[in-house]
Amino acid sequence: MAESVKVGLLGLGTVGTGVASIITRHQKELQHQIGCPVEIKKVLVRNKQKLRENSFEDELLTEDPQDVLLDDEIDVIVEVIGGVEQTKEWLITALSQQKHVVTANKDLMAIHGATLLEKAAEYGCDLYYEASVAGGIPILRSLSDGLSADRITKIMGIVNGTTNYILTKMSTYGSSYDDVLKQAQELGFAESDPTADVEGLDAARKMAILATLGFSAPVSLDDVKVKGISGISDIDLDYAKRLGYTIKLIGIADRSEGKIDVSVRPTLLPNEHPLSSVHNEYNAVYIHGEAVGETMFYGPGAGSLPTATAVVSDLVTVMKNMRLGINGKSTLAPMNAKQLKANDEIHTQYFIRLRVIDRTGIFSAITSLFAEYEVSFEKLLQLPVEGEELAEIIIVTHKTSQQTFEELLERLNQVDVVESVESSYCVEGGN
Amino acid sequence: MAESVKVGLLGLGTVGTGVASIITRHQKELQHQIGCPVEIKKVLVRNKQKLRENSFEDELLTEDPQDVLLDDEIDVIVEVIGGVEQTKEWLITALSQQKHVVTANKDLMAIHGATLLEKAAEYGCDLYYEASVAGGIPILRSLSDGLSADRITKIMGIVNGTTNYILTKMSTYGSSYDDVLKQAQELGFAESDPTADVEGLDAARKMAILATLGFSAPVSLDDVKVKGISGISDIDLDYAKRLGYTIKLIGIADRSEGKIDVSVRPTLLPNEHPLSSVHNEYNAVYIHGEAVGETMFYGPGAGSLPTATAVVSDLVTVMKNMRLGINGKSTLAPMNAKQLKANDEIHTQYFIRLRVIDRTGIFSAITSLFAEYEVSFEKLLQLPVEGEELAEIIIVTHKTSQQTFEELLERLNQVDVVESVESSYCVEGGN
């Protein structure tokens, strides 16, 4: 091993700045762990002229990726620049140059993770990506090491901070989605184009990564069923609250009898469920293992320093591996083939809200339809709609298959006394 | 590496049985991870004749420790038999025979951890002990790997399931300590001699282990200040609740300016603090790092299978290390000298409950004493005591030093209108 480990940094945005700051501030601790100093040798930036707070000397910065990727002295590439296709090519170049890679890029890992991990194995290099899921929470490590003896049956998580912030504020203040989104954008908790967050895509990427690792099966982004939060009304949040539930954007990866189902969607959780009290921009991942039972990991899902902590912790692992001469040997190929559940193999509870004409006999017409599909009720609420001859019926069902529920929904829409099916959600975490 | 890894098991109680069960049931997953089968070759038991549920063949069981410790074919010793001094000697023998060790023994690690880790390093062996703290929660791993880039400033945990169960029931049902303890004993959540649990000793052992690892400094059991829960009255729980707090037995390891303070004591936490909603026998460890901010790890603190999951996960790590030829190289000696805080360097908020004679002017006599010590109030409650000419005053102070508070307490006890200082607790988790 050289007298110092040399790092090439791709990107100097908020996370990159955090990485540089931790490497500087915690140099003593890092040296203790890896036995030599850590040095950032080159930094790829999009624009050298941009004013920056960090005091990197000018000659460290470059706008040419090759300056970093082909530098013989650089041992490890830290990728915090984002992007997918071009970044993938850069990292393959880096791996082919025998450089280890640490990345915080969930988009990249969700789409090209399998390819990149193969390339890393081919070139005998490390590829770590802890920061790509749930920022400061060491969740990938916990799945791959801490719970390595167990068989994971369910992973349930709040893995997107923006949507959790929005839902927390909507629920606390009874505000509308649009108002809270605008506020979140002003405060920097939501992007100016919030689509990837609010439509669930960001969470889906993370769930694909978690499911792949937790179930040791090649789950891709396309396998994840996604629904975002933009359709949630404050009325639903209010009814959920009255019935003892909190609505969260929940990613669920579920495995039983060798078959997998992965989804991201707004979900009702009982208030006493540990994930219900995860507020604002925080993330949490709840894991159910056959032997260990329930565990939960909670922490900041994003942010410069939390994410940078995960990146530098991965860097420490790479550098320890360098000291021990075991790089490229810790990643395992998935052991299981991927088999997805069909809709009639997925069972959950549902919340449904209907507007019906407020007349004698209507209620029994509706309940008899539920009875026909053998869907029974756990909770039920009927309220008149003010100023109209309508009533709202809110039902929380017992567990039923997704297929049955979808058929029932279609039938409900055809019943003429049903004015509209206003909303429906999955309900998780019950008994 | 041999065609299988051979394990010697010391102890076949609840955890030992769980270990054997996981090794059998998850054999396929284990083989995928380590590349060869895992086999339990010998099991030390105290009494071979005892009826057991597991179907170990008779010749695997032995009452003679040397049969296991000196068996040349055994690669790893899994210690789940408990005990301190004799067990320490056994493990030193095992290490001297080049056998790696996995232990779930917190008493042993809190007392002789440093010695055993030195011996392991001397003989080039692995020694892992994840299961010794917080059962199924992979917390030691998270501290040493997942957060390795960060500087940990505070570890706060509910690390004893028995006391958390008792406090949860007292708080939920308003029952007395004695009633709940008796019930917990009947249900198997408390030992027939509950002293080590309820007096905080068990939690103190775990905090010594956590602080040593988190602060990279040799914190021993003697350094931990301990107070148990046996003195908590249901009245205190009730007042705490009225003021928006939950009382938990909290272990705190705190570091600032290079100085450390470690304690275990009943502590008031604001209801919205994540640790307040950790109920029953569950454990949780809350970590504050300079860069990562707040993270929390939640899960079962004990139990056969959760604890066994942690043991077998350690075993997987040992076996992976064997495959890579890097045993004995992952443990780091503490990098920092231990410097403990003096009482005037420890600052916290306090809750105090006084009984005073209910007469005009008393209140001002008491508050002027607080003013003399420059201790200000965050919350205050005064209530008459039914049927007596007494009042109760409950005060939550702002932060003050432990030394100041102790001096103030002593003075309060001398004021003649103060009938008694009924109780006082630390308050954590405020702003």
Image: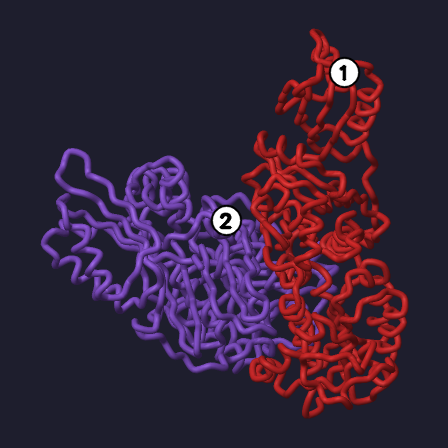
Chain colours: A red, B purple
Instruction: Work out whether residue B294 can be spotted.
Output: yes
**Chain ID of residue with mark 2:** B
If the image is split into quadrants, where does the C terminus of chain B sit?
bottom left
Secondary structure at badge 1 equals helix
Q: Position of residue A203 (x, y in %)?
A: 74, 52
Can you tell which mark lies on residue A45?
Answer: none
Element type where label 2 sits in the image: loop
Quarter of the image for the N terminus of chain B: give it.
bottom right
Numbered label attached to residue A369 = 1
Q: Quadrant for residue B429, please give it.
A: bottom left
In this view, the residue in front, A339 or B346, is B346
Q: Is residue B138 above or below residue B362?
A: below
Look at label 2 and name its amino acid. Answer: Gly
Taking depth in this image into account, of A198 and A176 the one nearest to the observer is A176
Q: Which residue is outermost to the bottom?
A: A3
B266 or A382: nearer the eye? A382
Q: Does A50 appear above or below A1?
A: above
Chain for numbered disc 1: A
Residue B344 on image: x %, y %? 30, 73
Task: From the top left corner, tell me how far across and down residue B295 is, in percent.
Answer: 56, 60
**Residue under pointer 2:** B303
Q: Are marks 1 and 2 in contact (CB under 8 Å)?
A: no
Q: Residues within 10 Å of mark 2 (few under 14, many from 20)?
A: some
Gap in Å between the C-alphas at discs 1 and 2?
A: 45 Å
The percent coordinates of residue A174 (x first, y second) are 61, 39
Q: Does residue A97 sit above or below B192 in this rendering?
A: below
